[in-house]
Image: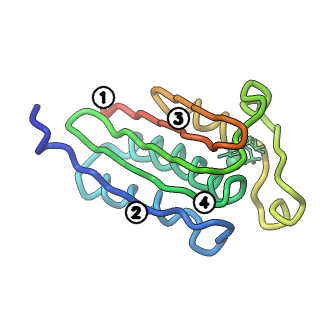
């Protein structure tokens, strides 16, 4: 397949903006839907991307989202220059969260974001470095 068949999308993810939080993932969800992608695939992509996007908002002062949609998959890359994750195995555990009370009061910080990304992505890669930031790459296959 040629490069011309890859659709690329880019979004900035604003820091600590709980009103527009989730806009990038809703936009991607809409695009996948317009492309006629299967509902279960859209659901997996939207949930995994939403969790990564929200993490960039609440834990990392925002970041960017780069999406590549081709014939057989979507690759979602969420990048931030936040504090990084010191213990990724611990962070991956269900219920683990360092979210402050102010964030929990708004309904975030249940500690299910990373476990849900793992669950819904066909492949999840996380590169993180303390003091440098975090990159999450989610692949969801269309079939
Ligand atoms: N992009 C990120 N930058 C820094 N820390 C992160 C990031 N994503 C996740 N974390 C850390 O991993 C923990 C678990 O993440 P997650 O499972 O999404 O739960 P929650 O966001 O509800 O706290 C977070 O509380 C935070 O400590
Ligand atoms: Mg989270």
- Who comes first in sequence, dot 4 or dot 3? 4
Instruction: Give the label on residue 65, or none.
Output: none
* Callout 4 secondary element: loop
Cα separation, mark 2 vs mark 4, equals 17 Å
At horizontal 37% and vertical 58% (from top left) the residue drawn is: 10
Mark 2 touches mark 4? (CB < 8 Å) = no
Q: Which residue is mark 4?
A: 62
Where is residue 11 drawn, in percent x and y? 42, 61
Is residue 12 left or right of 55 when viewed as pictured?
left
Cα separation, mark 4 vs mark 3, equals 22 Å
Cα separation, mark 1 vs mark 2, equals 22 Å
Cα separation, mark 4 vs mark 1, equals 32 Å
Mark 1 touches mark 2? (CB < 8 Å) = no
- Who comes first in sequence, dot 2 or dot 3? 2
At horizontal 49% and vertical 66% (from top left) the residue drawn is: 23
- Who comes first in sequence, dot 1 or dot 2? 2
Q: Nearer the viewer, residue 94 or 82?
A: 82
Q: Which residue is mark 2?
A: 27
How crowded pointer 1 is (Cα within 10 Å; few <14, some 14-19, many 20+) is rated as few
* Callout 3 secondary element: helix
Q: Which residue is mark 1?
A: 143
Asked if the beta carbon under badge 4 is closer than 8 A to the nearest atom of ligand 1, the reply is: no
Asked if 10 appears above or below 74 in the picture, the reply is below
Asked if the beta carbon under badge 3 is closer than 8 A to the nearest atom of ligand 1, the reply is: no
Q: Quadrant of ligand 1?
A: top right
Cα separation, mark 3 vs mark 1, equals 14 Å
């Amino acid at each position: 397949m040629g490069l011309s068949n890859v659709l690329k999308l880019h979004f900035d993810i604003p820091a600590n903006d709980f009103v527009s939080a989730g806009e990038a993932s809703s936009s991607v969800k809409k695009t996948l839907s317009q492309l006629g992608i299967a509902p279960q695939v859209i659901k997996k992509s939207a949930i995994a991307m939403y969790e990564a996007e929200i993490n960039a908002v609440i834990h990392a002062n925002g970041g960017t989202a780069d999406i590549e949609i081709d014939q057989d998959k979507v690759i979602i890359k969420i990048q931030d220059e936040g504090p990084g994750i010191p213990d990724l195995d611990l962070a991956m555990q269900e219920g683990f969260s360092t979210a402050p009370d102010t964030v929990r009061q708004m309904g975030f910080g249940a500690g299910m974001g990373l476990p849900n990304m793992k669950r819904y992505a066909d492949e999840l890669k996380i590169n993180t470095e303390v003091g440098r930031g975090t990159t999450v790459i989610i692949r969801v296959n269309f079939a």
